[in-house]
Image (tube, rainbow, N blue to C red):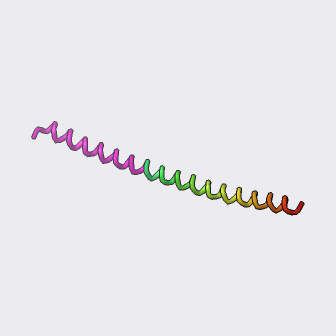
Amino acid sequence: MSMVGMVLRKTATILLTILKWILQAVLMLLKLVLGIAKLFLLLLALAARVVLTMVGVMAGRR
């Protein structure tokens, strides 16, 4: 095997490893963003339920 072939193969391996790390980081970031969105929606649903309950109580008192 020639020297150029070895260098190209090692370079390709390093580039693939870096690409794999970048993809793993992107997936972790996506998981984090989705988790935050899920938490936000749960809090929004809770707040909406509290508001609707209070509105229902106000309507019941009239």
Where is residue 35? Give x, y as percent: 53, 55
In magenta stretch: residue 46: no
Residue 25: image location, x then y, percent: 42, 50
Describe residue 11's horizontal placement relative to residue 47 as left or right.
Answer: left
Query: Is 8 within the magenta?
Result: yes
**What span is colored magenta in the figure?**
1-25
Residue at 9% x, 40% y: name it: 1
Q: Residue at the spot x=29%, y=44% of the render? A: 16
Q: Position of residue 42 (x, y in %)?
A: 62, 58
Q: Residue furthest right?
A: 62
Extreme residue toward the left, this view: 1
Residue at x 57% of width, y 52% of height: 37
The residue drawn where x is 90% and y is 60% is: 62
In the rendered structure, the answer to whether residue 45 lies left or right of residue 55 reads left
Quadrant of res 61: bottom right
Left or right side of 33 for 13: left
Of 62 and 19, the residue lying toward us? 62
Q: Is residue 45 left or right of residue 28?
A: right
